[in-house]
Image: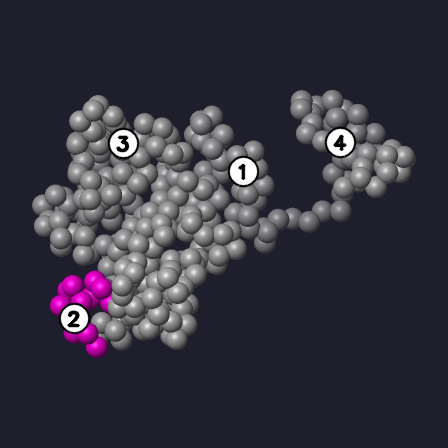
Amino acid sequence: MIRIDSVTKRYPDGTVAVDRLSLEIPDRSITVLVGPSGCGKTTTLRMINRMVEPSEGTILLDGEDTRRQPVTTLRRSMGYVIQNAGLFQHRTIVDNIATVPRMLGWGKQRARERAAELMERVGLDPALAGRYPYQLSGGQQQRVGVARALAADPPVLLMDEPFSAVDPVVRKGLQDELLRIQDELGKTIVFVTHDIDEAIKLGTMVAVLREGGRLAQYAPPAELLASPADAFVEDFLGADRGIRGLSFLPSAALEVTTDAVIPAGAGAGLIAAVKAPTSWSPTPTAARSAGPSATN
C-alpha cells in the first residue's frame, strides 16, 4: 500500500501545488488522480517516486518512508509511463523495452527475451521489434511505453496522462488493454488524467482534486457518481453523471413489472412537479406541420 500522509508541496515563490493531501492507495488496484489543470495531480505522482520532494508530510510504501530509501532504488521499483511515451528515438523497440532490465544488470539476451514477452502482452506485433519509435503510430508507441514500464516487473506503476495524445478510438483501445493487463498482473497503479470519463472507466478508486492541490473527494467510481461530496465535484462530474452511474447498477436484481408507471390522468400533475424540463417531444400533429427536422 502507498500511504500519502498530510503531504504539501510548496515552491520557493510561495506557490502551493499540493495542500495537506492524505490518501491510502490500495495494493493491486488502479487509483486515478483527476481534476482541472493546476490541481497538483502530476506533482503528487512525482512525489511518490521522489522526482519532486514533499515540503511537508510523508509518503509510505508498504509502511516504509520513501525518503529512507536510495532514490535510484525507489525509482527502479516503480514503472513510469508518460504522455507521448518518452521513448529513446535512437534505440529499436525491443531495446527500448529492455532498458530497465539492462540497467539492473540483466544480460542482453535475457532482457530481449523479456521485451519480446511484453510486446505480446501489450498487443504489439513481434515484427515491430527491430523498428524505431518514429516508425510506429502514436498508439503503438504508448504500448511500448507501457511495456518498458513493466519490463523489470515493478510492483508499482505510475502513469501520467499516458493516453491523452492519441485519438479517441485508439485511446479506448489502450484503456481496454490496460484493464486487461491489470487483470492479469495485479499491479498497484496510480494514474493521472484530466478526463473524468477515463477516471470512471479505469479507476478502482478515484481522487478528485480541486485547484490548489486539495482533495475534494476520494471514493470508488459508483459512489462518486451517486453521491458527489460538494458542488465542485458535482460540476466536475458533469450533467450526465446519473446516466453514467447506471452502468454500475446490476440488472439481475431488478424486478420487471407490467403495472402502469404513470396512472391515467396523472400527466398534468407530473409535469407540474418538474421544476425545469430540459426538452419537449412534439405531438404527432406538430411534428408533421414542422417538417422532418422537428423529430430529429
Count residues near mark 3 (Cα–Cα under 10 Å), then give few for <14, some for 14-19, many for 20+: many
Where is mark 4, residue-wise?
Answer: 280
Tell me the CA gap for discs 3 and 1. Answer: 27 Å
Which mark sits nearer the N-terminus, 2 or 4? 2
Type of amino acid under label 2: Trp
Residue 267, position as x, y percentages in the image: 79, 29
Count residues near mark 2 (Cα–Cα under 10 Å), then give few for <14, some for 14-19, many for 20+: some
Where is mark 2, residue-wise?
Answer: 106
Asked if residue 107 lies left or right of residue 294, the reply is left
Where is mark 3, residue-wise?
Answer: 18
* Element at label 4: loop
Residue 89 lies, with reference to residue 57, above or below; the image says: below
Residue reaching furthest bottom? Answer: 109
* Element at label 1: helix
Tell me the CA gap for discs 3 and 2. Answer: 38 Å
| Extent of the magenta region | 98-109
Type of amino acid under label 1: Arg
The residue sitting at 45% across, 38% down in the picture is: 224
Tell me the CA gap for discs 4 and 3. Answer: 46 Å
Residue 239 lies, with reference to residue 83, above or below; the image says: above
The residue sitting at 75% across, 31% down in the picture is: 280
Towards the viewer: 223 or 151: 151
Which mark sits nearer the N-terminus, 4 or 3? 3
